Amino acid sequence: MPEGAQKFLSYPAILAIAANTMNGPAFTTLPDVAADAGLLLYITLIGLSVAMAAFVCRRMVYAMWASLETDPAGIAADVEKGGNYDTMKVDSGSLQSMGLSSSGNQESMEATAEIDEIVPAPSSEGGSQLIHREHEHTDEGGSSAVQEESLLSNKEHNENMAVIEKRNRNQPVLEHTAIVGQSREAYGKKASIYVAFTMVASALCLALAQMMLCAAILDGMFVALGGKSCAFGLPTPTDPTDPTSSPSWIHCTSNSSMKPYAGSGAPTSLISIGAVIAATASVAMGTVDLDEMMSIQYFLFGCLVIAAVRFSVVLKNMANGLGTGDDDGDLTERMLLGEDEDLDGSGDSASLVDWFIGPNPFQTIGPIMFNFAFVVTSPPSSAMAKKESIAYKALGMSCVVMGAMYATVGLCGAKVSNAVRNGMIEGGSDSNLLSLILLSGGKDGASMFDLCIIGLFGFSTVASIPVYCLLAKETLVNDAGVAPLPSFLLSNVVPWILVALTYNAAFFEAFVNWSGLLILGYANFSLPLLLDLKLKKVRAARAVSKIISSDEESVTKLTKGVLILVTASITLVIVMSITNSLMLASAAFILTVGLMHLVKV
């Protein structure tokens, strides 16, 4: 493809990328979440989260593509950099003053140049541009300084024309219409700095959590296949009670779980086999653009779908087999009905799956909501769509597809998760999704086919890592002024170094979870809606004449209502996680709603 040519992503491509970015660590907790929420509440929360995420995506895409009408973001950004545009743009019968000369050379240009003619230039939008063609007028003894200044002006002219040509395309310019660019247009450059920091932090939280998950899954798969997985790390002190022990740089584990090296005596910093494979794949994918990695994205999305279907079938069969050892032969039915039965005669009752509301409903709101925390990663793919409708429809459908996967896996695995947590399955100590699959074969372990499926799922989690890293890289390049190579290293390589340094650390997982809880919710759901509301006012104020229809007013009211509800819900989840008090969380919810009503967006 020629340099500078437009690149497009199709509907399936945008859907696959968005779906892959929703395949995060929370996917493996779905059986636990469904058991805690109750079946009906779980389905309801999934449905509400799908609707919320799709609505936020719709408003974000609208804010991006609405920039094509006036392109104020791009003009504002270039004005801050010292560029003025005095080109007369003719579009739909209206003339708008833009620019062709640099502000630094404006005075000298006025002294040495005149406008001789106006040349029409074709526009990709069907209009035309009237370009001021400037000619030098000098005396016979004109100095070379004027000629040099003319060459400099021509160079700046060509650069500015390249910017204008880029804007005339039928796609939004990513650096001006992504979340940071929208914040710059809406609230100014100072606010955009804070938003840029938030975007990088969000991307790194998502990437680090996904990197940990992918490495752990692959290490656990190697344990299941070969009996152990090994890693490279600093030697640990020898055991004084074991005369044969000696310091070693190689540490192995036979624990097939999401924390494979926990309790193995290995140091905190480890370079495991799974981490090396995952890092190699993700860094390689990070070296190419989104449109160039689509074949891999399609393949990994297919792996995710196959794994989700197979996991659901295995968990359903396990749930149906729970009652085989019961005298009445109907333990599964009693668990579904929520009857409190004494299972082992010791007076302990089983944890039951309730039809309506489970034992810990409020603890499930956050995990379900944050399964859809992909909105901040979607501007790059949305800006490459051929049409606005393709972008928001693909993003919305990705929410529906992943919501269906979440619902199916969670419902099928809820009973098995409860059984493991209550000691009803021999050898079950971890109710994580993949640990449940490993228990499917009883004492013999999972079948080779299911182990391969776990491997496919592990590889599918790699797909989202380069997308997260791309968000961080684009923000560093476009908004922080970092050069491409350092930004690539900071976004694609440094996170893997952090994973290696803390791979076996208990605190790192807590750090990632809490940072994600405090940052991702507001950044993914509240910020795009807030920017959409603000940009409507900013762009309407710039417009010469703007007729606001009743439909637009209704959408604005709906957007503000969703913004208030979502922000208050995120606040409730955070306060509930910190205090574990329903009363304080409810008070925070009500206070947030009241404050949001008082604040003018």
Image (cartoon, rainbow, N blue to C red):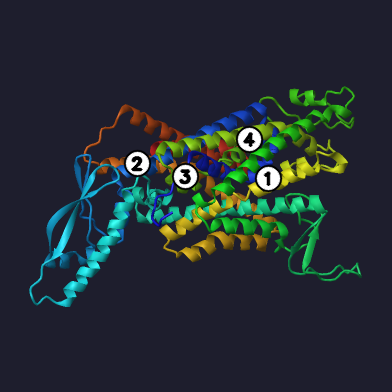
**Alpha-carbon span between mark 4 and mark 2:** 33 Å
Q: Secondary structure at mark 3?
A: loop
Q: Amino acid at mark 4?
A: Met
Q: Residue at x 45, y 44 (%)?
A: 382
**Alpha-carbon span between mark 1 and mark 4:** 13 Å
Quarter of the picture holding the N terminus: bottom left
Q: Secondary structure at mark 4?
A: helix
> As displayed, is residue 523 above or below residue 196?
above
Is 469 left, or right, of 160 in this rendering? right
Answer yes or no: do the residues labelled 2 and 3 have beta carbons within 8 Å? Answer: no
* Disc 3: which residue: 9
Q: Amino acid at mark 2?
A: Ala
* Disc 1: which residue: 457
Front tag of 1 and 3:
3
Answer yes or no: do the residues labelled 4 and 3 have beta carbons within 8 Å? Answer: no
Circle nearer the N terminus (2, 3): 3
Q: Residue at x 17, y 53 (%)?
A: 119
Instruction: Name the one closer to the observer, 219 or 81.
Output: 219
* Disc 4: which residue: 405
Circle nearer the N terminus (1, 3): 3
Q: Residue at x 73, y 66 (%)?
A: 233
